[in-house]
């Protein structure tokens, strides 16, 4: 026994295990259904884990939303509250951004109860999952965008500018106005000297707005200067994220991004230029007599139409599939405009992980790998990007450390996000505990971040990719931050709009409905909320509906879930039909749905437009 020879196999002090002991422990581990599914890397959730109460509350919320979002859009009283609240008594809500969270908030906000001012460097919402399609002309940019003023024509104002500083205690945000004088230069003098009734008092203090420490100071003698200050009762911080390209030398200078409509437009222009550069006589074999010059011309021609995509997530995979569709069309033998480049064009996908689309199930990840390989995409898995140059990328394979320099014409960054400068400025004015992982801002279940004083708590709500909210589900070992996806952002925006529409006191924990006068206490909205047991605001609950991805050649991957409960996985042509139907349904308006459907029909009938404008 001292030697351990007679120790029972189950003795935890035993240092050596026989094959029989290992088999017994393995069987014990997988004897539980949950542990077995985790061992196979399958979801442990079943149909019995569907959160029916959450689904019921979402249904009732949608009924409420259909009435509340019309408030303020017509003359007369608030139909649900049955009160004639003076417009001057409304709380001011400043919304930073026009992305998924901001768009959902603006769409549902009751402008009868809230004075909504939107601030963003762009005046539109863009359906970001289709940016890859727009970059090759499958759909047009304007088909998948909606002006924020159209989303809710009754918001009090939209300010085209960028938030650069904040006074948390004074509830003021500083905004640097965009330069709108690129075309209408004759209007600059009038606008800069005219008194503007919507502008607040001039900004006297200097504001740091750039990472390099550049200072901006508004001229107090002007009525509308380069920097204005907006007061708020509630600040909705939904500024999104920027491309995290600074981690690789040269990536910020030479990579194209794919986060905005302008990014998609620039990439489409670059692809058109690359095709024309590769068609010039100086890179054709017939232009030279000697063999060495011919070889150099061939190599240079192929470099000009080699496109490297960095990142194996949904953006990188869908862009690779769209690129292969586009190149297949323009190089086909029958009527391709660039048939002469068929053997020269190549797409390289660089990904640091071992699987594409890591958020999807194993069978779909494998199908994504097979589909792109069959189309000729050069997949470089377990590979890191080391450097990006004007005409090359350097990659390093994990494990072996082997480096390779590849000549390329275009490099697209689709591999990670970083906080925008305003988020850093905001964190500098918040308690240290507000800083979350990845430069995000920690929020509670009501999307509120910590503030320096109790009086300002609840005045700043952080949504979307900027927010770091940790949630723990039934079978999770520890809380994990919600993913930075459009689904999360859109649901958070609608959730916060409901809270403010209902008039919850956001300083209280949990937020509660305020005490009202006798006439107000029996309004339809109040009665509706009391009947549902919502005198206290419920916390935010994310309800995932699954993941979709397009992989080219009219094939898509569908992972459909209801919450964490998997319903079905599918790939192929039927999945492609579902992918298109979901994207069509999720468009911002009926106008966008009609335009997208027409674009798809036009592309199918006549092909993608290769005109360079």
Image: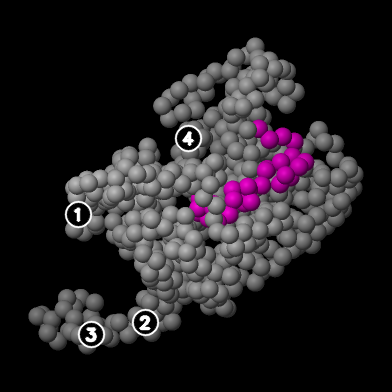
Instruction: Decide whether residue 147 is among the magenta residues.
Output: yes
Ranked by sequence position, the earlier of labels 2 and 4 is 2
* Residue 550, percent from left and from top: 50, 64
Q: Nearer the viewer, mark 3 or mark 1?
A: 1
Determine crowd level at label 3: few under 14, some 14-19, many 20+ residues with C-alpha closer than 10 A: some
Q: Is residue 428 magenta?
A: no
Residue at 72% from the left image edge and 60% from the top image edge? 61
Between residue 326 and residue 569, name the one nearer to us. Answer: 326
Which residues are drawn in magenta?
130-159
Q: Which residue is mark 3?
A: 21
Q: Residue at x 80, y 35 (%)?
A: 89
Give the number of the disc on residue 401: 1
Q: Quadrant of residue 232?
A: top right
| Figure quadrant of the C terminus | top right
Residue 30 marker: 2
Is 113 or 216 nearer to us in this picture?
216
Viewed as shown, does residue 43 lie left or right of 305?
Answer: right
Q: Residue furthest left?
A: 3
Residue beneath disc 4:
421
């Amino acid at each position: 026994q001292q030697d351990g020879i007679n120790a029972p196999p189950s003795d935890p002090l035993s240092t050596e295990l026989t094959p029989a002991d290992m088999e017994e422990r393995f069987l014990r581990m997988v004897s539980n259904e949950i542990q077995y599914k985790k061992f196979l890397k399958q979801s442990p959730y079943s149909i019995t884990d569907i959160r029916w109460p959450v689904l019921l509350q979402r249904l009732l919320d949608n009924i409420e939303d259909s009435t509340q979002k019309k408030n303020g859009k017509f003359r007369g009283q608030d139909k649900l509250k049955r009160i004639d609240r003076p417009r001057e008594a409304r709380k001011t809500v400043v919304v930073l951004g026009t992305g998924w969270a901001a768009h959902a908030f603006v769409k549902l906000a009751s402008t009868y109860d809230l004075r909504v001012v939107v601030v963003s460097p762009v005046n539109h919402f863009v359906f970001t999952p289709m940016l890859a399609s727009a970059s090759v002309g499958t759909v047009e940019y304007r088909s998948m965008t909606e002006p924020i003023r159209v989303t809710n024509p009754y918001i009090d104002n939209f300010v085209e500018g960028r938030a650069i500083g904040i006074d948390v205690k004074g509830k003021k945000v500083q905004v640097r106005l965009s330069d709108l004088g690129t075309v209408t230069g004759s209007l600059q003098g009038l606008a800069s000297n005219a008194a503007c009734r919507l502008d607040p008092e001039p900004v006297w203090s200097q504001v740091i707005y750039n990472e390099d420490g550049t200072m901006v100071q508004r001229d107090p003698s002007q009525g509308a200067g380069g920097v204005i200050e907006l007061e708020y009762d509630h600040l909705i911080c939904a500024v999104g994220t920027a491309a995290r390209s600074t981690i690789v030398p040269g990536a910020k200078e030479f990579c194209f991004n794919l986060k905005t409509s302008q990014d998609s437009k620039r990439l489409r222009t670059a692809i058109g230029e690359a095709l024309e550069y590769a068609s010039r006589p100086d890179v054709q074999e017939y232009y030279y007599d000697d063999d060495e010059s011919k070889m150099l011309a061939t190599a240079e021609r192929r470099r000009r139409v080699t496109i490297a995509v960095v990142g194996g997530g949904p953006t990188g995979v869908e862009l690779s599939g769209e690129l292969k569709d586009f190149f297949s069309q323009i190089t086909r033998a029958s009527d391709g405009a660039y048939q002469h480049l068929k053997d020269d064009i190549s797409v390289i996908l660089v990904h640091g992980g071992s699987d594409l689309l890591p958020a999807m199930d194993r069978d779909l990840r494998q199908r994504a790998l097979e589909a792109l390989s069959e189309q000729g995409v050069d997949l470089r898995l377990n590979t890191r990007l080391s450097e990006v140059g004007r005409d090359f990328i350097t990659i390093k394979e994990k494990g072996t450390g082997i480096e390779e320099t590849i000549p390329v014409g275009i490099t697209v960054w689709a591999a990670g996000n970083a906080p925008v400068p305003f988020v850093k400025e905001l964190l500098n004015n918040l308690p240290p505990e507000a800083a979350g992982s990845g430069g995000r801002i920690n929020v509670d279940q009501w999307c509120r971040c910590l503030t320096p004083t109790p009086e300002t708590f609840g005045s700043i709500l952080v949504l979307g990719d900027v927010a770091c909210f940790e949630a723990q589900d039934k079978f999770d070992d520890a809380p994990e931050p919600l993913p930075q996806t459009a689904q999360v952002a859109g649901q958070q925006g609608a959730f916060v709009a409901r809270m403010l529409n209902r008039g919850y006191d956001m300083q209280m924990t949990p937020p509660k409905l305020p005490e009202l006068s006798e006439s107000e206490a029996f309004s339809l909205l109040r009665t509706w909320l009391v009947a549902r047991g919502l005198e206290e605001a419920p916390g935010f609950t994310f309800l995932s509906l699954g993941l979709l991805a397009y992989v080219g050649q009219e094939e898509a991957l569908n992972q459909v879930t209801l919450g964490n409960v998997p319903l079905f996985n599918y790939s192929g042509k039927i999945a492609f039909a579902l992918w298109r139907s979901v994207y069509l349904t999720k468009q911002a308006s009926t106008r966008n749905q009609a335009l997208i459907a027409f674009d798809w029909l036009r592309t199918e009938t006549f092909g993608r437009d290769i005109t360079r404008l």
